[in-house]
Amino acid sequence: MSYERFNIEQLDAYTPGEQPTAVDVVKLNTNENPYPPTDAVMQAIRQVTAESLRRYPSPRAATFRQTAAEVHGVTPDHILATNGGDELLRMAVTTFCQAYSYAPLLPGDRGGLGETLPTYSLYDVLAGIHNTPVVKVPLNADWSIAADFAEQLNDAGCRLALVVNPHAPSGRLETVDTLRAIARAFRGVLLIDEAYVNFAARDTVDLVRPGSDVDNVMLLRTMSKGYSLAGLRFGYAIGHPKLIAAMDKCRDSYNTDALAQAAATAALRSRDIAAQTWAKVIAERMRVTSELRRRGCEVPDSQSNFILAAVQGTPNAREMYQRLKDRNILVRYFDQERLRDKLRITIGTPAQNDALLAAWDQLTATRA
Ligand SMILES: *Cc1c(COP(=O)(O)O)cnc(C)c1O
């Protein structure tokens, strides 16, 4: 007999991308920034004092929120600091979704989570932990969001919609107008997961600034990708103060630590330096995209720090993943509907990308 709740017993836990310990691996599988964090970040970490570690940190990361508010043109009430973007997602499901067994529901209200298919696989795990229903609306062939996305979620009584923009794993960027229309039509909270927004042509901050005509939108930001701080675990929400206040009730008492607060604040303040890495990644993204297209791969335009490449013929995508891995090059393969014939490849340094392209040529050389 097992002791855990039934939905936990039934749950398939999240599978993170591989994190090899060998140093000579060309690691293009988990969308990390290939460049180091800024000097200002490392300096801020070194300047953390023994006294500030002896004491509890600011519970709501006050200095960070003030900095983020200035950067985004909002007030600190619009900002919630979290232990990585993943904690923000967990808090959103806790705050806005109902569980099957306890929900005091109105007729037609199932209280659950709505998402696109495919999407970030953590979303389903969080729904499973919270025992909340999930509605998946397939993306169109060009990876755009279905025109009746909000309607389908309303019909299913969803309380929270999770949309990745730019989308993972396709890299497609939706327009602000499309997302505004979804927010207007949807009766629940729309959380736009902007984990990769630093590599995109535009963001959707206008939807959450004071004066916005929608009050049910929240954005997810993370220091993991654009700011080269995946190891730090720091993310934040930007949203209407009433949504932020609701989420704040579900926060662990000291959810971000003193070191992370100092580093994340320094990262935002030195964002002009970090932006130089974004420009390099974007230039390489365009180069790798056209190189793979030249080799006959279908690669949709990406506004992110990865691309999704369709692999035709032999070796197929799964074999290609394995043979690249045998050559110490790690990319991501998803054994999922619409993704089985594709590889998600993180954009690395020019040298890493060259290694990938050279291996690709070797592996496909025997194709007729
Ligand atoms: C990386 C990522 C996040 C957040 O990651 P953290 O490292 O927890 O900040 C959120 N959503 C998507 C789609 C991501 O790829």
Image (spheres, rainbow, N blue to C red):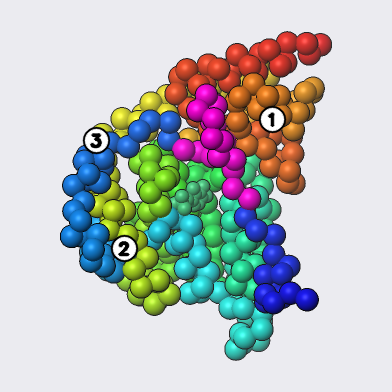
Image quadrant in which you'd find residue 135: bottom right
Q: Is residue 366 above or below residue 157?
A: above
- Which residue is located at x 71 percent, y 69 percent? 9
For the stretch drawn in magenta, the main secondary structure is loop
Tally of numbered discs: 3
Q: For the residue marked with disc 1, what is the amino acid? A: Tyr
Image quadrant in which you'd find residue 84: bottom left
Where residue 183 appears, as percent x and y from the top left, is 48, 64
Q: Upstream in the sequence, badge 2 or badge 3?
A: 3
Where residue 2 appears, as percent x and y from the top left, is 74, 74
Q: Is residue 17 magenta?
A: yes
Which residue in the protein does label 3 denote?
A: 39
Q: Is residue 359 above or below residue 214?
A: above
Q: Which mark is residue 321?
A: 1
| Quarter of the N terminus within the rendering | bottom right
2 or 1: mark nearer the eye = 1
Q: Is residue 170 magenta?
A: no
Q: Secondary structure at mark 1?
A: helix
